[in-house]
Amino acid sequence: MARTPAPSAVRRWASRETTGGALLIAAAALALLWANSPWRAAYDAVAHTVVGPAAWHLDLDLAHWAADGLLAVFFFTVGLELKREIVVGSLRDPRRAAVPVLAAVGGMLVPAALYTAVVVAAGDTGALSGWAIPTATDIAFALAVLAIFGRGLPVAIRTFLLTLAVVDDLLAIVVIAVFYTDDVAVGALALALVAVAVFAVLVRSSCAHPVLLAPLALVAWGLMHASGVHATIAGVLLGLAVPARPVRGEAADRAHRYEQAVRPWSAVVALPLFAFFSAGVTLVGGPGDGSPLAQAVVPAVVLGLVVGKVTGILGVVALATRSARLRLPDGIGLRDLLPVGLLAGIGFTVSLLIAELSFTDESTAAGAKIAVLAGTTLSAAAAAVLLRWDSRRARAADMNDDGVPDPPQPVIGGAPDDG
């Protein structure tokens, strides 16, 4: 048998959902260990190393390059995925999309309310600016946990989680653009939108080629950064500009092709480096008042991710399916939404980004970040246990209780798990 060429094997490995999740965990763990070791000064020195041209206001340290630059690559893939879901995916049919969309809304409102209640009760009203931290879902991490521990469950659960997470990220993007943008340079923002518009025209033409598209995307990103709007928004807009239906007689749509090309770089390079520079919180020094662990944001974020997400998603779906005559997709029951709600509590990437944008006080920001890591870990662990429990239970003929037996369902992993 002929051996698989090395580049193809590497690309397949990088494209696996489990690969991205494993690298995220490894990068965050390495950062935490280094930042709390005797060599933590070296970690700070690396994170705060400044590179880039000052004349263009791009003299940023490596931590900001990871958050503003590399993370834009991830948000570009989010934009591509969102475009495909809207045009040809589960968001195309409003009735089919209604339940996961409502679940995403509930999964944002309840964590935000719970966070607000906790910090107000603690008397730390200065921490209210972080209300959006526990509202986000990390698509890559959540799907990785589902792929590992959800073998044998219906693929419809993955589709539901993906739809929920994509809508969640869309709402998080809106939140970042509206609530975490201070001063906007209107001229630079207008030029950024012009660059995105030119990109949209070019990406649909016969001249679409990375040699032309990549520099134009960099210009749009640079102008968005200069405008004061978080530069990752440029990545989303550029992704949404790519056509999600075949054009000019092509066999596959360009959004799908670009996603396949960019996602390995996002999963293997962009997200792990962002996690490495963002998760390096120093906890050494004890739990006194100046310690990150003593901040009110810690229980607020953890409760928001672990409890708020599940409560919001289950509560809204229960209301929608009982009072609005909506139904879950075939093959999915309310019992499946408990692990799904916990998977949605895996905030990680976007939650860490919002934590950085929320606070100027280093101790509060560090507390928020460690809470994100703790809440993500608890949510992922609980979801893993419940996914295994769910996969071992017999499934009813009509899981979504719509009065019609569910058709045969393809399963995650390709075959039921024998356990």
Image (cartoon, helix red, strand yellow):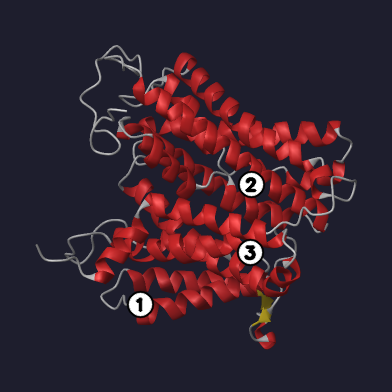
Say which residue label 1 marks. 210
Toward the viewer: 158 or 234?
A: 158
Residue type for callout 1: Pro
Q: Quadrant of the N terminus?
A: bottom left
> Label 2: which residue?
373
| Residue 417 in the image: above or below residue 348 | above
Which numbered tag is attached to residue 277?
3
Confirm or deny contact between disc 3 and disc 2 (CB under 8 A).
no
Residue 96 lies, with reference to residue 398, above or below; the image says below
The crowding category of the residue bearing disc 1, from other C-alpha atoms within 10 Å (few below 14, some 14 to 19, many at least 20), is: few
Residue lying farthest left?
1
Circle nearer the viewer, 2 or 1? 2
Instruction: Tell me what residue is drawn at x 74 percent, y 37 percent.
Output: 300
Q: Is residue 356 left or right of residue 390?
A: right
**Can residue 279 be spotted in the picture?**
no
Q: Compute the Cα span from label 2 to label 1.
A: 36 Å
Upstream in the sequence, badge 2 or badge 1?
1
Label 3 element class: helix
| Residue pictured at 41% horizontal, 62% vertical | 241
**Label 3 Cα crowd, 10 Å radius (few <14 / some 14-19 / many 20+):** many
Residue 175 position in % (x across, y down): 63, 49
Image position, residue 255 (x, y; %): 33, 60
